[in-house]
Amino acid sequence: MTKMQSHSEAGAFTHVIADLTGVAAPALRDASGLTGLLIAAASAAGFSIIGAPVVRQLPDGGVAAVLFLDACHITLRTLPDRETLLLDILAPATRDAQKALDVFTRRLAPKELRSEVRARG
């Protein structure tokens, strides 16, 4: 299920991008549920949330959202017709961004997860 690439040079930040495919379309249209996942993911990774998530229901039925965190962020975009969630997590290198990704994979149960981790900064 998981295909992950890692670029391990030391950096100030860890950047995780992930494509979760094979996710039930109704979950990808559920703005309230996805908002809860953003907050749960941030909490699981020990991030400090600095404001409420900005969440938009899009004309195609998908959801776009961003949660600003102290010195980082989590963003998502859903494509219900493709059963896909695109996730972007930028975290200080001192935090475990994988824990945030794990929240999404546990709750959404994708059939496939492709992710990449890069050291940034």
Image (cartoon, rainbow, N blue to C red):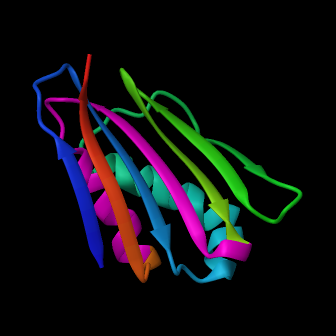
Front in this rendered view, residue 79 or 58: 79
Relative placement, left or right, of 27 versus 62 is: left
Identity of the residue drawn at 64% across and 70% down: 28
Image: 36 above or below 12? below
Relative placement, left or right, of 94 versus 120 is: left
Quadrant in the picture for residue 23: bottom right
Image: 14 above or below 24? above
Q: Which of the image's four quarters has the C terminus?
A: top left
Image: 121 above or below 33? above
Identity of the residue drawn at 67% across and 79% down: 25
Specify whether residue 97 is painted magenta.
Answer: yes
Residue 118: percent from left, percent from top: 25, 36
Residue 48: percent from left, percent from top: 34, 32
Magenta span of residues: 81-107
Identity of the residue drawn at 68% across and 49% down: 64
Q: Farthest residue to the right: give it.
A: 59
Identity of the residue drawn at 34% across and 75% down: 106
Specify whether residue 109 is painted magenta.
Answer: no
Residue 36: percent from left, percent from top: 52, 59
Relative placement, left or right, of 63 versus 103 is: right
Residue 66: percent from left, percent from top: 58, 39
- Total tally of numbered discs in the picture: 0
